[in-house]
Structures are given as structure tokens and as C-alpha cells.
């Protein structure tokens, strides 16, 4: 008689061969890159539904249909279970958000919060399905190639916008709010383009170095170079910090591979510069405008004056953080359990620091669940796929640093599907651990 584990593994193998699920996940991955509204409606003003809002219905349906085996899988893997625990805590804390919204006459906030939780569940359930489908190396490669293609397409749209070929794709409201920033199909906010390309760049580096996966090196190199170009054009200082932290970690953990990748990418960028030098002029202008021109005194870098540099480059984040700290200290009763998922009605805005935001919304309890999920990646063992392990842990560490300056691994509207892509990237780096040696 088969054991429970054998039975569930068999069920997952059957699920992994589902053509409908495969098509659904391909569409979900595409939707992480195509964030332009596909449907507009008006409840709280100018509202939008995106591709993953519709494809997500199929994800939810297929999770419900296979909930027994999927819940077994969640309980089996700590990185899945810890994130599931955090999500369930957020769902419980929605009760407080709804109550406070009702008392303050903000009934539309209830709808907004429900939609954000729907997004959270879509991204999480898709993560589980990706892990199951990518146990097949054939499907794994297909999804990786689709990821590369979407990065190249998204990058080309941004480049064509800078060259005046493609128009601005977002609303007039977004144009005013974000200064007409050219972000292609990803989102009007700079951090969307920056984080999507940073996550993709790091993921491609891991697969490029892990030769056993046999992903086409030319395609991976193309994906890396296009991601680097788009990241440079993003002007996202948070994403720049993330990349620098990752490179520092990568250099320490794998110095030889770091040097090797630097040489390969150096040659690749030289070839691109021979073809078109204007691209690098655009990148230089963006970085100068977004970073160096914002520093009040150039000697601050040499002095290591982090406090003043944060003041200059943080776009008001320091004051927001201090405001949140002061609010939490004067409302200590919020700190243990929070005031409700997606609830910043009383304080008026998010903290642009996920750790402070989570304390306000889901308390120290929720913050513990969230950080425990991220730290669980560091406990994973990569005996056969060492480079994937180094890159995954570098990605998580660097992203945790960037969360001091934003809420990109959350479900607020301006960050769109960054959380979904991050989970997909971790699935790509994790999945080979399940492969049977051959």
C-alpha cells in the first residue's frame, strides 16, 4: 500500500502534466510584465483591472480543485508554510481594516483591501503551481525562455519610448504623478521597472552560471544585457541599491564566478556600445539625474555620511519613517497586533519601509511571520546546484535591504506584480533541488 507521501507526490506529478494549468501559468507570467490596464471602471475614481486579475480567477479555481494536495505541499515546505502563515494572519487582520473603514466612512477601502488580498493569493498560489510544473525540466526551460523573452520585450518598449517610437502608455493622472517617466508596459512608478529588471537580472545570472540546467547561454546573455539596460534607464535608486548589495554578496561568496561574469558582461556591453552608443548616453543621463545630481556634497560619499546621503537620495523617506516611528510610539497598542491589513487610513500614507508598514498594519506578530518567511530561504541546502543557492540567497538578502526603502514585496497598487515575479524567480532558483540526479 502506498504511503501518504507517495500518493501526494503522484498527485502532484499528474497535476504537473495539466495542459490547462500550464497555459494558465504562462499567461500569469506574461501578466507580470504587462501591467497596462485591460479594463477600466470607476468606484473610487479611475480604477483599473489588469491581465492577472482575470487569469487569477483560473488560478483560484485550480487551487480549489487541487486544494488537498496543494495544502499538503504547503505544509511540507517551510518557505511555503511560513508565507502561507503570514497571508492567513493578514486575512484575519482584514477584519480590523473593515471595521476601521466602516467607522471612518471609507467603504471603498474595504473593496480595495479585498482586491489586494486577491492579488496576494494569486501570486502565492501561482508560486506553488510554478514549483510543481517546473519539476519537469522541459517545462522549466519553457518558462525560463518565456521570462527572457518578456524581459527583452519590456526593455525594448522602454528603449523605443526613449527614442520616440512608442508613446507613453499610462494615464494622464499617472503622467502627472510620476513626471511622465518612461516605463514601457510595466508601470508608471520607477521602482516597478527597476525591481522587475533587477530580479530578472539576478535570476538570469544564476542560471547562466549553473551549466547543468542547459539553458541557452546566448539567450541568457541577451536577457542579462537587456535587463541591465532597462535597470539603468529605470532611475530607481532602490533597485540600484539592491543590485549593489547583491554584487557585494556575490563577490564575497563566489569571487571567481563574479570575475568570470564581469568579463563576459563587459564583452557583451562593448558589443552593444559598438552598435549604439546613444543607449549608454541615455543611461548615464538617467543615473546622473537620479543619483549624482541629488547629492548635496560630492564628498559625502568618500566620508561615508550615510545619514546625509539618505536625506539627499531618499525622496522624503527619512521623514516618512520618523513620522511612522513617532506614530507607533504614541499608539503603542497598535504595535503587537497592528491595525489591519492594508490599513493606513488613520496615519494617511504608507511608510515606504515595509518593516514599519507591517508593524502598523499587522503588528510585530505579522512582521515576525514575514521575516521568518524570507529568512527560511537561507536554510535551504543546495548540494548539487551551488550557484543557484548563492544567487537565491544573494537575491533575498539584497531584497531585504531594499525593503527598508519600499514595500515592493507587498500588494500595494503602485508596485503592481513585483511580488509575483519575485516568487516566480525564487521558484526558478529553487526547483532544480527537486530534480533526480541523472
Image (cartoon, rainbow, N blue to C red):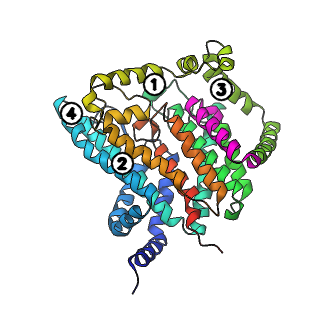
Residue 6's x, y, as percent? Answer: 44, 78
Residue closest to the eye, 155 or 246: 246
Q: Which of the 4 image quadrants contains residue 333?
A: top left
Q: For the residues labelled 4 and 1, say whether their Cβ atoms are less than 8 Å apart.
A: no
- Badge nearest the viewer, 4 or 1: 4
Q: Secondary structure at mark 1?
A: helix
- Mark 3 or mark 1, earlier in chain: 1
Residue 367's x, y, as percent? Answer: 38, 40
Q: For the residues labelled 3 and 4, say whether their Cβ atoms are less than 8 Å apart.
A: no
The residue carrying pointer 2 sits among few (fewer than 14), some (14 to 19) or many (20 or more) residues within 10 Å by Cα, namely many
Q: Secondary structure at mark 3?
A: helix
- Mark 4 or mark 2, earlier in chain: 2
Real-space CA distance between mark 2 and mark 3, rounded to the nearest whole angstrom: 36 Å
Real-space CA distance between mark 3 and mark 1, rounded to the nearest whole angstrom: 20 Å
Q: Can residue 357 be spotted in the picture?
A: yes
Q: Which residue is mark 4?
A: 100
Q: Which residue is mark 3?
A: 287
Q: Quarter holding the N terminus?
A: bottom left
Residue closest to the eye, 342 or 279: 342
- Mark 1 or mark 2, earlier in chain: 2
Q: Which numbered tag is attached to residue 86?
A: 2
Amino acid at each position: 500500500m502506498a504511503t501518504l507521501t507517495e500518493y501526494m507526490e503522484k498527485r502532484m506529478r499528474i497535476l504537473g502534466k495539466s495542459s490547462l494549468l500550464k497555459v494558465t501559468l504562462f499567461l500569469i507570467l506574461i501578466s507580470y510584465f504587462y501591467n497596462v490596464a485591460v479594463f477600466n471602471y470607476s468606484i473610487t475614481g479611475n480604477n483599473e483591472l489588469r491581465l492577472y486579475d482575470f487569469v487569477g480567477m483560473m488560478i483560484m479555481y485550480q487551487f480549489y480543485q487541487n486544494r488537498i494536495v496543494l495544502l499538503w505541499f504547503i505544509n511540507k515546505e517551510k518557505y511555503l508554510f511560513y508565507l502561507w502563515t503570514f497571508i492567513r494572519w493578514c486575512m484575519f487582520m482584514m477584519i480590523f481594516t473593515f471595521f476601521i473603514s466602516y467607522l471612518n466612512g471609507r467603504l471603498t477601502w474595504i473593496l480595495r483591501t479585498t482586491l489586494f488580498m486577491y492579488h496576494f493569493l494569486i501570486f502565492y498560489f501561482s508560486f506553488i503551481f510554478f514549483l510543481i510544473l517546473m519539476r519537469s525540466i522541459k517545462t522549466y526551460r519553457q518558462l525560463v525562455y518565456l521570462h527572457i523573452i518578456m524581459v527583452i520585450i519590456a526593455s525594448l518598449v522602454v528603449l523605443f519610448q526613449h527614442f520616440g517610437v512608442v508613446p507613453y502608455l499610462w494615464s494622464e493622472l499617472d503622467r502627472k504623478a510620476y513626471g511622465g517617466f518612461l516605463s514601457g508596459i510595466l508601470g508608471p512608478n520607477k521602482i516597478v521597472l527597476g525591481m522587475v529588471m533587477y530580479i530578472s537580472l539576478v535570476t538570469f545570472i544564476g542560471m547562466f552560471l549553473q551549466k547543468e540546467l542547459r539553458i541557452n547561454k546566448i539567450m541568457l546573455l541577451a536577457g542579462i544585457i537587456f535587463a541591465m539596460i532597462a535597470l539603468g534607464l529605470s532611475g530607481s535608486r532602490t533597485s540600484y541599491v539592491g543590485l549593489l548589495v547583491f554584487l557585494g554578496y556575490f563577490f564575497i561568496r563566489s569571487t571567481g564566478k563574479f570575475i568570470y561574469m564581469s568579463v563576459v558582461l563587459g564583452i557583451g556591453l562593448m558589443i552593444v556600445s559598438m552598435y549604439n552608443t546613444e543607449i549608454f548616453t541615455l543611461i548615464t543621463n538617467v543615473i546622473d539625474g537620479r543619483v549624482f545630481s541629488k547629492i548635496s556634497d560630492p564628498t559625502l560619499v568618500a566620508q561615508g555620511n550615510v545619514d546625509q546621503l539618505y536625506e539627499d537620495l531618499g525622496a522624503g523617506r527619512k521623514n516618512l519613517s520618523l513620522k511612522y516611528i513617532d506614530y507607533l510610539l504614541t499608539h503603542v497598542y497598535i504595535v503587537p497586533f497592528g491595525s489591519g491589513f492594508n490599513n493606513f487610513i488613520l496615519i494617511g500614507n504608507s511608510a515606504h519601509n515595509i518593516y514599519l508598514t507591517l508593524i502598523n498594519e499587522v503588528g510585530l506578530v505579522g512582521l515576525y511571520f514575514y521575516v521568518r518567511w524570507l529568512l527560511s530561504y537561507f536554510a535551504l541546502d543546495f548540494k548539487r546546484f551551488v550557484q543557484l543557492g548563492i544567487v537565491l540567497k544573494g537575491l533575498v538578502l539584497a531584497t531585504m535591504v531594499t525593503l527598508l526603502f519600499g514595500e515592493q514585496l507587498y500588494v500595494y497598487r503602485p508596485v503592481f506584480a513585483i511580488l509575483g515575479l519575485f516568487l516566480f524567480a525564487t521558484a526558478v532558483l529553487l526547483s532544480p533541488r527537486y530534480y533526480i540526479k541523472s
